[in-house]
Image: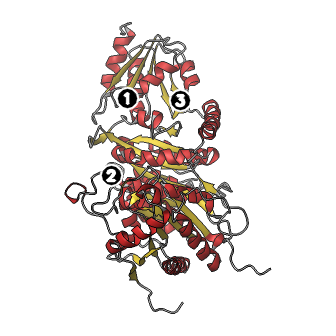
Amino acid sequence: MKVVYDKPGFLRGLPFTYCSGCTHGVIHKLVAESITELGLEGRVIGVAPVGCAVMCQSFFACDMIQAAHGRAPAVATGLIRAVPDGVVFTYQGDGDLAAIGTAETIHAAGRGENIVIIFVNNAIYGMTGGQMAPTTLTGQVTQTSPYGRQTDTAGYPIKVCEMLATMEGVSYAERVSVHRAPEIRKAKKAIKKAFEYQSSGRGFSIVEVLSTCPTNWGLTPVEALDWLADNLIPHFPLGVYKDKFAGEAK
Amino acid sequence: MAQRLLMKGNEAVAEAAIRAGCRHFYGYPITPQTEVAAYMSKRMPKVGGLFLQAESEIGAINMVMGSAAAGKRTMTSSSSPGISLKTEGISFLAGSDLPAVILNIQRAGPGLGGIQPSQADYNQAVKAAGHGDFKMLVFTPATVQEMCDCVFTVFDLTDKYRMPGMLLCDGLLGQMMEPVVFPEPVEGLPAKPWAVNGHRNARPGNLVNSLYLHPEALEARVRERFEMYKTIEETETQAECFMTEDAEIVVVAYGACARIARSAVTAAREAGIKAGLFRPITVWPYPKRELTGAAKTAKAVLTVEMSMGQMVEDVRAALEYKKPVEFFGRTGGVVPTPAGVLGEITRMAKGEWL
């Protein structure tokens, strides 16, 4: 029998612990497929964050380390400096990367560390039960913005790709989404490109993936996909924000 | 014959770390330890090593975590306020069973405090270097030579036990110049099959982790570590005794402060007082048996520290509260004088203790 579709070997085959309709599973698959297709498995060292995605340390079939909240880019720095031919990536959520870990993120980018950051932005803290994140939209209701995010007290959502694209140390920054099949295909392309760049020593890449949190958004999985399209994308436009090597032949 | 060099404590300890096999150093400027970072930035490129100035103390300790996890001998250094920032990372190192060396050239606190020497981070280093149930090896050298020797020992022991270790020094030691003979450079570092450095399709993936969602599993892991800590307490204590054989007043002091106390003990002996000095070199594990032995003939014990009295609690506990233990200290960056310590010894020799 001809196999036309299979789970990438880079995923251990353990059942995912994510909520129904959460798109972490899709993003995990894209990371795993990219690494498998590029034949990088043996060189990979992944850094798990604090938050829902800490569980990725059990799902990816490679060397993994679990960092303190927000510190993944600093841990990744220590790894890539110790293992220069390693394929080092972090997998971080919005609270981890853009709140408690802002300094680590910006300075790893500033140094142009040769790492990949998979930045999963669902505009909310998932693991702790749905609090306001740095990327929570204006007016968005969360557990700690019960009247909707008010800009006069809670400020404005942070646009990470736009910010990092201004930095000389950043090689590649793209925002993608996984709410529809065509977007998933584009997300795959972006993630694969980031790992291609990293594995050929091209420096710091970040792929921001807009993701759902049906549980804490209080929506069904299908409604969550629509909410992402209708609300997150207008505020966080998809696209390439920086690509130092655009147009270069591989 | 090995060369004898005159070096500042901060520079000597950096050179010693390199000779002990450290090739990954992550630093951040803070007085009075900045010379460590400056020396590393100059020397590391010459020996094929890495000096990286981190964005913060937090960044530095987490970079240490990355390189340590990759199997490298790794170090960071700072001074008191910066060490406070590193405590999160130290807890993660301990919880992830990672070896790494942290150097604290103590200054006065709390808060921004002052930049003069202090020993007021004893409790932080020994009792609570971060959240959770764990211990860290803590060495308290008293000379520039001993700083260098201790770096070798602490790197070996952190690798042996897979745990963080600290050199707890102070601004006096960091800033003073003394002659030093470096031990021979270390060759052939221990293998670390647990390291995360890419499985190279030759083994299953390794995991460096401190998360245990099942309380029984976490308790079991912590208990395993505490069994190991018990072994360390039985086998790895270090201390020095000076004239304690017949001493009626035993002074207990560590680090630079112990040298001041030693002068006072010598002066007391000259004045006919049977005084002695007990100097812990490890403060975790605390040399309890050695102290009990050294205080055998003591009528009273005097603990001298550059703090309001932190180690003194360990001295009382080690002696099981059976001997009078008094405290003399200066804090805020003020260094006690030999005369000040001698005054206390003299008073106590007359049988005056609280």
Please give the label number shown on residue B286: 3
The lab-note entry on whether marks 1 and 2 share a chain reads yes
Q: Amino acid at mark 1?
A: Glu
Sort mark 1 into few (<14), some (14-19) or many (20+) by Cα contacts within 10 Å.
many
Please give the label number shown on residue B30: 2
Q: Secondary structure at mark 1?
A: strand
Which residue corresponds to the image point at 40% horizontal and 53% vertical from the top-left? A130
Q: Which residue is at the front of the view, A38 or B186?
A: A38
Residue of label 1? B305
Q: Where is residue B203 shown, x and y percent of the image?
A: 72, 63
Q: Which residue is at the front of the view, B24 or A102?
A: A102
Q: Amino acid at mark 2?
A: Ile
Q: CA distance from mark 2 to mark 3?
A: 29 Å
The picture quadrant where one finds residue B224 is top right
Is B120 placed above or below A39 here?
above
Please give the label number shown on residue A150: none
Which residue corresponds to the image point at 54% horizontal and 59% vertical from the top-left? A20
Q: Is residue A96 visible?
A: yes
Q: Secondary structure at mark 2?
A: loop
